[in-house]
Image (spheres, grey):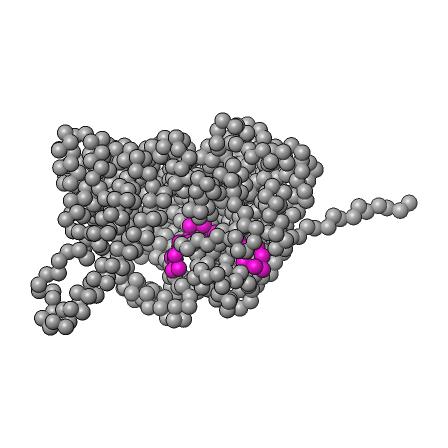
Amino acid sequence: MRKFSMILMFFLAFTFGKTYADEGMWLPMFVERLNYVDMQKAGLQLTAEEIYSVNNSSLKDAIVGLSNGPSPSGYFCTGEIVSDQGLLFTNHHCGYDAIQKHSTVEHDYLANGFWAASFKEELPNPELSVSFLIKMADVTDTVLSVVTSDMTPQDRSAAIRKKTGEMRKSWSEDGRYNVVVKSFFEGNEYYLFVYEVYTDVRLVGAPPSAVGKFGGDTDNWMWPRHTGDFSIFRVYAGPDGKPADYSPDNVPLKPKHHLPVSLDGVQKGDFTMIWGYPGSTDRYLSSYGVDFNIEKQYPAIIELFGAKLETWKEFMDADQKVKIQYASKYAVTANTWKYLIGQTRGLKRLNVKEKKEFLEKDFSDWVVADKERSEKYGNVLSELKNGYEQMSGSIEPMLYTNIAGMGGAEIIGYAAEFSSLKDLLKPVAKKDVPKDKKMAKTMMEDRRKQLESTIAELREGAKEHFKDYNAAADQKVFEVLTAKYLKKVPAEMQPAALKKMLEKSKGSVEAVGAKIFAESVFASEASLNAFLSKPDLKTLDKDPALQLANGFMEMAMGAAGPFRSAQASLSSAKRLFVDGLRKMQPEKVFYPDANSTMRMTYGSVQDYIPADAVHYDYVTTTNGILEKEDPTNDEFIVPPYLKELIEKQDFGPYGENGKLVTCFLSTNDITGGNSGSPIINGKGELIGLAFDGNWEAMSGDIAFEPALQRTINVDIRYVLFIVDKYAGATRLIDELTIRKAEPKPVRTESM
């Protein structure tokens, strides 16, 4: 595949090695036209129809997007169906939230793992859903038929929203399918996706965190890696085989296709495919956007997330209950925090801004060489520059208001959820009451029922909220983040309620925090339920947490105004820039940025050279687990039985020559959302689960780094070893379609 010439020149100038990663996140509907011949040459043995088909079962039918809710527009992770009974593999960190929700001090599935011994023991997860792609279609002409060249960005967006809304409704078959329309190439193309969504997804198995999260935050984004990053779920359907909400009467799904599992292992150079739902990349970002991220956007997020993590960890280390409560929140925040640190480092170290400037120089020269091009694209780069400059002026107060204010202490965001109750408690104005007594009575009765329903929902939601909440930890978070907020946000942009509280407390943030958590009804489940038993408007109006929630919300909306205006002005420039780039390089096959739609990437198993005199092998083994073991550090604890199996080399059919591979590297192009994606060999067999990228190429979401970019995968043989030999969950092994090539006979010549 062709790459930008400047990127190639940059990397060829450095001796980073001779193997190059395979760039591109491709829409599978175009596989036969764009990629199939190249994939065959690289080692693919399947037909194009076996990979993607609308009319027959194909590889796509075994790939699912994981989400929270029945009508998702995007997916936080990917999973794959591995049995004819709806068994699903994904990453441990993808299932982490579900595992945490089922965990208690008495039944700590995070620490000890979980293995259902039968279908009846599999645990439901009401918020979790999986989506199967039924078909996709290019609807660019239909969507863009409603826009004109003289439309403002706001009018254009409104027209497109209206049209895509109509399309979603018409393609849904009366609600049977979830239909999503997405923009590609910055609004130059549009594609429609039809999904079937299953909402009964049950937890089947998970290794202890000492396996599934081995290495913790220290090893996150790093190689070499020894993490058994997997968890197991099952998709259930109604007795008729169709999607249905949880019911004891539901049955395991009979999928259209499931992935067979290979025990053959990997060798350097082996063909690999990864299928999944990559979340977001920005490969066509301009140099101005790179500068904006490094200098303006990332520093605030890194500082605030880091402070929150440090505060949480203080309480988590001191109390096992708090550790369980905050495990999922901490993991999600830590992942983003380290990612942004790594991306900042990569963007600077690999001179990504400079490479973008080279490309923009070529673009500018191409534009001015033609009068028509000058008229159409002549202002694009200056508009990009101006747009990012405008955003730079408003981004810092907006981030601090949202992350340290509304998204700082949980009590603030939670209080904001009670705005609907507050509205229902307000007396109805006389002018809004119908003069007809019967109608007035009906209206008031409806309002009473709505109030009762809202209170019941809030009371139920409180159980979930307070299950994973610690007031003391949250109070400390408020104090730490509010102190940072006050240093960065001008006084005129701070909520009046906060300034008043600080004035009464003589400027002491600690005193304000103490007052909030002593007086707010949102500080504990007991005080909240007492209030909900007899709710009144006066209590809500006086509640300090809700006062701050309303104040921060008002300030956030105010700060977001200029930012959104600048974003809108950028949308046209970005669209024209990408359009121009594609026309400037007509011989190049472009792929769209990731946007949480199904993509296929292909590459090979490879090692890499991250720096001078440093070489990383393409596999790790269980030997590395013992080398990293540290009983004093909970990130590197090795369970005793696992250690015994490794020391005895008791690997069963999953090891070879006294070794067991844990993880391996491939050159596939992935990003967040691909977590849990299957990595598949040329025969269409599962050989591992993708779970991470590597530290040296953290800038890859913005500029692909061919010599450095690697995907870290947990080897499927290590997964099965943990399931079978360590956990003894042989019923799950029996469900799988396991394949192992027969050894080739040694040929002997007769004399």
Kindly identify the residue that appears in the image at 42 percent across and 46 percent down.
Answer: 101
Corner quadrant of residue 486: top left
Seen in the image, is 196 located left or right of residue 487? Answer: right
Q: Is residue 154 visible?
A: yes
Q: Residue at x 54, y 58 (%)?
A: 86
Note whether 135 is above or below 534 in the view shown.
below
Residue 206 placement (x, y as % from top left): 52, 45
Task: Kindly indicate the quadrant of the structure image that contains residue 402.
Answer: top left
Residue 23: image location, x then y, percent: 49, 47
| Magenta stretch encompasses residue 87 | yes
Q: Quadrant of the C terminus?
A: top right
Q: Residue at x 39, y 30 (%)?
A: 318
Residue at 48%, 33% (x, y): give it. 635
Query: In the rendered picture of this protein, how many numbered marks are placed on residues?
Result: 0
Q: Is residue 737 left or right of residue 35?
A: right
Does residue 709 appear in the picture of this structure? no
Q: Position of residue 109 (x, y in %)?
A: 48, 43
Residue 686 in the image: state x and y as whole percent: 59, 51
In this picture, residue 663 sits left or right of residue 221? right
* Of the pair 686 and 459, the residue shown nearer to us: 459
- What is the magenta range? 65-88
Asked if the stretch drawn in magenta spans residue 261, the answer is no
Residue 456 vs residue 644, the one in the foreground: 456
Height in image: 358 above or below 440? above
